[in-house]
Amino acid sequence: MTPEHEPAASADRDDAVAVQHHPEDEVRRAGATYLLGRMILIPLTRLIYRPRIEGRANVPKDGPIIVASNHLSFIDSIAIPVAAPRRVHFLAKSSYFEGTSLKGRFVANFMRAVGAIPVRRGAGQAALDALDEQRKLLDQGLAVALYPEGTRSTDGRLYKGRTGVAFLALQTGAKVVPVGVIGTDKAMPVGASMPKIGSKVTIRFGEPLDLAHHGPATSGRARRGATDEIMAAIHALSEQELAGVYNEVPAQGAIEKIKQALPHERR
């Protein structure tokens, strides 16, 4: 595995993902692997890293929820499912599931064990398609994980949230469980191939947010207001310095620079 793996969280990024499989099929397929994986992963992770887990009781035991977290490291996508009291799904690159060697099969089973669902990279409409697939999971009463910042923070600051998470919550009525992850960037910095043993990691689950009072998903003001509420809750848990800007890949070319400079909604 490489540090490039992360859930699809932004609905308008050019390097977003396009869904390859029906999520319902993958959920059923991964059931036994997931249960076996948790039996092994949870004790092993707690033995090696001794993570501090706070607020597990805040995670509803059933019904659709969106787990919205800050994003510091590749292992956030392992730490959160391991720490959560129920199964949490996220989207991962399909290449992790396609290996035929012994190592490839191990990686595929590992990804299923932590609740990952394969998607294929694409462009343009792809991220909206990914959000639609997560909506289908929520319609089944499942839990999905998303990173409102859209990508990992390489400087440890908390960046402005994109509105895709809020859109999904307002569209489906799912409550949002904010999460603050602390220390994963030290346990596995960007560029590292393996996490460091003995690093202190904390995962904090906040109280579920009902965002319906912001208005319908079709309202830009509602999406922005709901996003700001989500990010404020994450900030209270993670205690990071606020960046005050979006975490965006530097624009290439004059047109892209103009597009980034102009006010527009980031999903």
Image: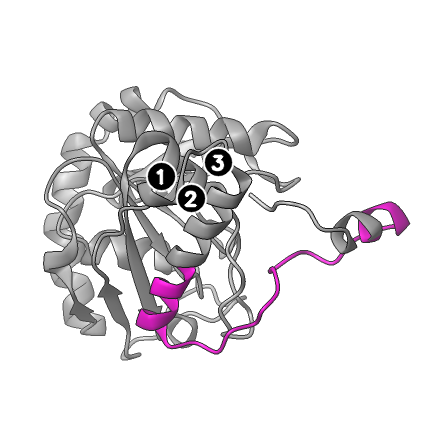
Comparing 4 with 103, the one in front is 4
Depicted 177 relative to depicted 137: above or below: below
Q: Where does the image place residue 169, in percent across and percent down from the top left?
A: 35, 39
Q: Is residue 128 above or below residue 253?
A: above
Q: Which residue is mark 3?
A: 95
**What's drawn in magenta, residue-wise?**
231-257
Picture coordinates of residue 41, whole percent (x, y): 18, 55
Q: The C terminus is located in which quarter?
A: top right
Q: Residues within 10 Å of mark 1 (few under 14, many from 20)?
A: many
Find residue 133 and report its image quarter: top left
Q: Which residue is mark 1?
A: 169
Q: Are marks 2 and 1 in contact (CB under 8 Å)?
A: yes
Q: Are marks 3 and 1 in contact (CB under 8 Å)?
A: no
Q: Which structural element holds mark 3?
A: helix
- From the top left corner, tell me how far across and down residue 255 is, in percent: 86, 46
Mark 3 or mark 2: whose residue is earlier in sequence: 3
Q: Label 2, on which residue?
A: 166
* Residue 9 seen in render: no
For the point 30% across and 75% down, the residue is 197
User: From the viewer's perspective, is the residue at label 3 or at label 2 nearer?
Assistant: 2
